[in-house]
Image (cartoon, helix red, strand yellow):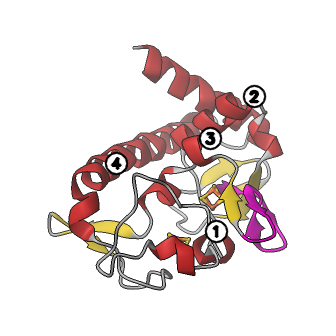
């Protein structure tokens, strides 16, 4: 069974086999995909959809970083259908991410992370075989740095919201968030 990440840029592993080929896209089925402001902005503009259409709210994992809105203290994640990411499309013999070009940063970086300045595979990864880290090093390091800076931007934005606007509705927060990203990209 082939799966979503079958991509010519990602075509090697320690064993020469592309990991996603022998995997049933576990990562898109097992994880709730939490998103930041840039992730939501890219999806909303790319799909031309209001974020409410593809986002779900969850109780905040970290109380100091949750978004304080009328609906509660929350985090934002992608909606799921039957426990699977709503953007995963299943065909007879393969899976496809329908938002591959604009998928969240966490999806792009999985299953890699940085430890002590080195790119490594997550110890808890769901991939059936090991990836060839050297093959991905340059691209992933730059991606992970960008992702880290986008999460920092998001944390600052949430702190500002919680200080100045807390208690207003989620839809007001979403507009606030998208406006912040838009003006940061314009500057
Ligand atoms: S956005 Fe795409 S890659 Fe990310 S979980 Fe959903 S289907 Fe998988
Ligand atoms: S769990 Fe790993 S191998 Fe499986 S689809 Fe996700 S990234 Fe690919």
Q: Does ligand 1 reach within 8 Å of label 3's beta carbon?
A: no
| Circle 2 or circle 3, nearest the eye | 2
| Residue under numbered circle 4 | 143
Evaluate if marks 2 and 3 touch, with contact meaning CB atoms under 8 Å apart.
Answer: no
Q: Earlier in the sequence, mark 2 or mark 4?
A: 2
The CA span between labels 2 and 1 is 22 Å
Instruction: Determine if the C-beta at disc 1 is less than 8 A from ligand 1.
Output: yes
Disc 1 element: helix
| Residues drawn in magenta | 74-93
Of the 4 image quadrants, the one containing the N terminus is bottom right
Give how far across and how far down residue 172 sits, in percent.
74, 32
Distance Cα–Cα, label 1 vs label 4: 19 Å
Q: Earlier in the sequence, mark 2 or mark 1?
A: 1
Q: Which residue is mark 3?
A: 40
- The answer to whether residue 31 is seen in the rendering is yes
Q: Which mark is residue 104?
A: none
Name the residue carrying label 2.
48
Residue plotted at (39% across, 52% down): 9
| Residue reaching furthest to the left | 117
Q: Are marks 4 and 3 in contact (CB under 8 Å)?
A: no
Label 3 secondary element: helix
Where's residue 73, x and y in %?
A: 67, 58
Q: Quadrant of ligand 1?
A: bottom right
């Amino acid at each position: 069974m082939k799966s979503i990440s079958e991509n010519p840029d990602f075509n090697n592993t320690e064993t020469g086999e592309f990991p996603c080929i022998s995997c049933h896209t576990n990562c898109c089925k097992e994880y709730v995909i939490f998103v930041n402001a840039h992730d939501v902005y890219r999806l909303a503009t790319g799909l031309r959809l209001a974020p409410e259409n593809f986002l779900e709210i969850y109780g905040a994992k970290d109380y100091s970083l949750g978004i304080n809105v009328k609906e509660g203290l929350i985090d934002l994640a992608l909606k799921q259908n039957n426990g699977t990411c709503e953007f995963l499309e299943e065909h007879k013999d393969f899976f496809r991410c329908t938002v591959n070009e604009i998928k969240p940063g966490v999806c792009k970086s999985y299953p890699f992370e940085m430890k002590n300045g080195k790119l490594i595979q997550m110890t808890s990864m769901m991939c059936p075989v090991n990836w060839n880290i050297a093959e991905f090093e340059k691209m992933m390091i730059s991606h992970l740095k960008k992702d880290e800076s986008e999460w920092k931007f998001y944390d600052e934005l949430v702190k500002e919201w919680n200080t100045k606007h807390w208690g207003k509705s989620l839809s007001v927060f979403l507009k606030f968030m998208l406006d912040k990203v838009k003006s940061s990209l314009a500057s």
